[in-house]
């Protein structure tokens, strides 16, 4: 009999013993271990001109499981994307007509607020759910989200919870969402001033990365997303870090081929962690790819999201790199390389919120450590740096050293 399968005969004697010990009837008292596993797979495409009628990526994705069906699709588009590409709905309409035998839009693409707004105001989730209800989206229909990480997170939550899960295709349109969040398995919105307080782990049906969207993105957003590439290179891949150093001049001017490689390599490293890291749904205490993130999440909240996620991550990386040096884990020469690369890419490695005190006098950023642990449950696990390319998990942080690291960052910024 397979491991973990309940075996009523073999368990009978043990049940009776347990029941007798507990003083209850053997028929009432029994524990069966239910066990099954589900394999997840989803394509992640890198393309351009996704909605050119001649581009097969989208229609092949829709038809992957049922090639002969006409697939119903409801599309939400980030309003920032729409502002940059006002003809996008018309292009999508033309694409759907061209592939009309296999694809049907149940409505015109629907504009939704881009950026954190869609995640902090919960009524947007309900509004989108109403759209799914009104257009009779079922588990075999598709909900397609075109937008930045915030829109993907919110639409992902809608798709994961409506009918307990409908097919969700992500079309990430920012550097950050193409190289990091879009290929992940998480979604969610913010509540009680806590990021991603409400959400679910729900792998998408597919992720379709179109490089053309990046060209429409404001420079600040393009730079911000590169922080995740620096982050994952630092803890996983020294060769990628050296590539980033060698190509930083190209990345600064958003040279297309360099941007394409940076996004793709970063996405691959994130995908590898999810597939092979052993804990895709983060049931343990570790968040191995969240280097620099405990402080970053705190800074985002403290600045009411004026700092972009990537900008906060760059500061978080600088802080945890400094801390790694102060804790005797990392060579100071490695820290110089990290700082040089981040500053060269255009990041500022200081923000006054790092020093902020809460009304009760507690240090606001240090509180982030507590929040970080609570979000995960269990023990605190923070990734630091041992070398460039090698992350190191620690289970406590010394508050005095954190404050010293903050002071050092401030002193460096003042030079
Ligand atoms: N689910 C995850 O695993 C995960 C991981 C990391 C980050 N996130 C979340 O992602 C969010 C940040 O995402 P983001 O950095 O992609 O930014 P964003 O979604 O906040 O978008 C930034 C701005 O860019 C606009 N925009 C998006 N695409 C555009 C385009 N192609 N052209 C012009 N404007 C465009 C948006 O309207 C918005 O104003 C945060 O909420 C963060 O918590 C989620
Ligand atoms: Zn991040």
Image (spheres, rainbow, N blue to C red):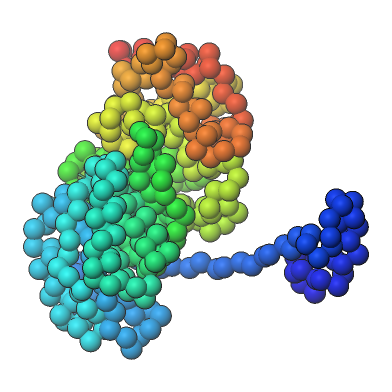
Residue 28 percent location from the top left of the image: 78, 62
Q: Residue at x 24, y 55 (%)?
A: 127
Residue 402, relative to residue 21: is it above or below? Answer: above
Quadrant the C terminus occupies: top left
Considering depth in this image, is 286 or 232 the residue closer to the camera? 286
Q: Is residue 412 visible?
A: no
Q: Single out the residue that lies furthest toward the bottom.
A: 68
Residue 68 percent location from the top left of the image: 33, 88
Q: Residue 192: which quarter of the image?
A: top left
Q: Is residue 291 left or right of residue 410?
A: right
Residue 88 percent location from the top left of the image: 13, 63
Q: Residue at x 40, y 43 (%)?
A: 196
Considering depth in this image, is 57 or 115 the residue closer to the camera? 115
Q: Residue at x 8, y 58 (%)?
A: 86
Q: Is residue 359 left or right of residue 33?
A: left
Q: Residue 304: which quarter of the image?
A: top left
Q: Is residue 151 left or right of residue 235?
A: left
Considering depth in this image, is 113 or 32 the residue closer to the camera? 32
Q: Residue 233: which quarter of the image?
A: top left
Q: Residue at x 32, y 86 (%)?
A: 69
Residue 392 percent location from the top left of the image: 58, 35
Q: Is residue 205 visible?
A: yes
- Number of marks present in the image shown: 0
Residue 76, relative to residue 220: is it above or below? Answer: below
Residue 194, relative to residue 165: is it above or below? Answer: above
Q: Is residue 389 left or right of residue 80?
A: right
Quadrant the N terminus occupies: bottom right
């Amino acid at each position: 009999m397979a491991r973990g399968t309940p075996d009523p005969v073999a368990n009978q004697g043990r049940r009776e013993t347990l029941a007798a010990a507990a003083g209850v009837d053997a028929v009432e008292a029994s524990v069966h271990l239910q066990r099954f596993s589900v394999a997840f797979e989803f394509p992640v495409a890198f393309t351009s001109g996704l909605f050119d009628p001649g581009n097969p990526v989208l229609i092949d994705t829709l038809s992957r499981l049922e090639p002969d069906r006409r697939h119903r699709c409801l599309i939400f588009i980030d309003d920032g994307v729409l502002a940059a590409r006002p003809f996008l709905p018309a292009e999508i309409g033309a694409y759907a007509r061209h592939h009309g035998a296999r694809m049907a839009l149940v409505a015109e693409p629907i504009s939704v607020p881009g950026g954190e707004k869609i995640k902090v105001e919960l009524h947007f989730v309900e509004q989108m759910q109403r759209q799914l209800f009104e257009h009779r989206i079922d588990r075999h229909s598709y909900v397609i989200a075109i937008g930045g990480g915030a829109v993907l997170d919110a639409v992902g939550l809608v798709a994961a919870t409506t009918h307990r899960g409908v097919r969700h295709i992500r079309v990430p349109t920012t550097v950050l969402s193409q190289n990091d969040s879009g290929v992940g398995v998480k979604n969610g919105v913010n509540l009680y001033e806590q990021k991603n307080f409400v959400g679910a782990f729900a792998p998408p049906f597919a992720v379709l990365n179109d490089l053309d969207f990046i060209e429409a993105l404001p420079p600040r957003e393009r730079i911000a997303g590169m922080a995740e590439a620096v982050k994952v290179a630092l803890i996983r891949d020294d060769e990628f870090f050296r590539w980033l150093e060698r190509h930083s001049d190209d990345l600064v001017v958003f040279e297309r081929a360099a941007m394409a490689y940076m996004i793709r390599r970063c996405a691959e490293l994130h995908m590898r962690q999810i597939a092979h890291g052993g804990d895709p749904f983060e049931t343990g205490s570790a968040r191995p790819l969240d280097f620099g993130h405990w402080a970053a999440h705190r800074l985002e909240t403290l600045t009411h999201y004026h700092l972009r996620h990537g900008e906060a991550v760059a500061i978080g990386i600088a802080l945890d790199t400094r801390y790694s040096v102060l804790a005797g884990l990392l060579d100071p020469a490695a820290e110089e390389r990290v700082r040089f690369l981040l500053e060269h890419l255009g990041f500022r490695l200081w923000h006054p919120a790092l020093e902020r005190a809460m009304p009760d006098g507690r240090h606001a950023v240090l509180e982030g450590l507590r929040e970080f642990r609570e979000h995960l449950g269990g023990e605190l696990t923070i990734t630091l740096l041992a070398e460039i390319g090698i992350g190191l998990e620690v289970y406590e942080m010394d508050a005095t050293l954190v404050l010293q690291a903050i002071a050092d960052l401030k002193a460096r910024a003042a030079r």
